[in-house]
Amino acid sequence: MPTISMFYGIIIYMFFYDNKKHKLPHIHASYGDDDAVFSIEEGDILEGTFPKNKQKLVHGDTQRRSHDRLAACGQRPKSFADKAIGVIMKKVISVKPIEGKKVAVVFSDGMSGVFDVAPYIQSDFFKRLEDDAYFKQVRLFFSGIGWPEGQDLGPDTIEADLKALQ
């Protein structure tokens, strides 16, 4: 099953055509020994169990990416406005690559700082960022940052390790 997102130890998977069992556009999420199937539109668990605090993170990720994921399923997205669960996501509004595999970022609430991407490059998913020319292609991607071949980091991950500008 293709991995489409990874954050805080959570892995999100999605089949392109998997509508026989659940009859709804959905994703599969894994965290440690817990596995669950989440509705893309509503963020509800369709099957399985998942820690409550991690459910909020999955819901936030699904909310940010729902339009793309629903489009991949051939579905038209609905609004999440009626399904608030208390997760307010910040948005990165500016990103600039700097020396040492770091990026300078500014959030929508005015917070700014430097985020070190180097620890992520150790994983296969981010290995391509070792190339300096490719690393410099960083851009805004949904509410976080991303690169042309799909590597991306959400605002929650960036904020958690953000260091003050020096």
Image (spheres, rainbow, N blue to C red):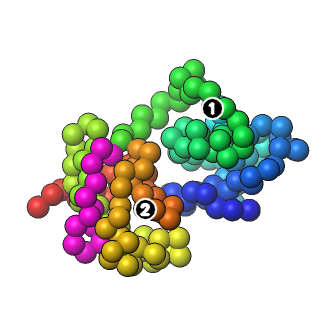
Observer-nearest residue: 41 or 150? 150
Q: Residue at x 35, y 61 (%)?
A: 138
Q: Quadrant of residue 10?
A: bottom right
Residue 53 visible in the picture: no
Coordinates of residue 103 in the picture (x, y in percent): 27, 62
Tag of residue 147:
2
Secondary element under disc 2, as helix, strand or loop, is loop
Q: Amino acid under label 2?
A: Trp
Q: Residues within 10 Å of mark 1 (few under 14, many from 20)?
A: some
From the image, which quarter does the N terminus lie in?
Answer: bottom right
Q: Amino acid under label 1?
A: Pro
Coordinates of residue 149 in the picture (x, y in percent): 50, 65
Predominant secondary structure, magenta span:
strand
Q: Residues within 10 Å of mark 2 (few under 14, many from 20)?
A: some
Q: Quadrant of residue 119?
A: bottom left
- Which residue of the protein is positioned furthest toward the right in this rendering? 20
Q: Residue at x 41, y 38 (%)?
A: 89
- Decide whether residue 21 is among the magenta residues: no
Tag of residue 24:
none
Observer-nearest residue: 49 or 165? 165
Contact? badges 2 and 1 (CB < 8 Å): no
In the image, the segment drawn in magenta is: 92-103
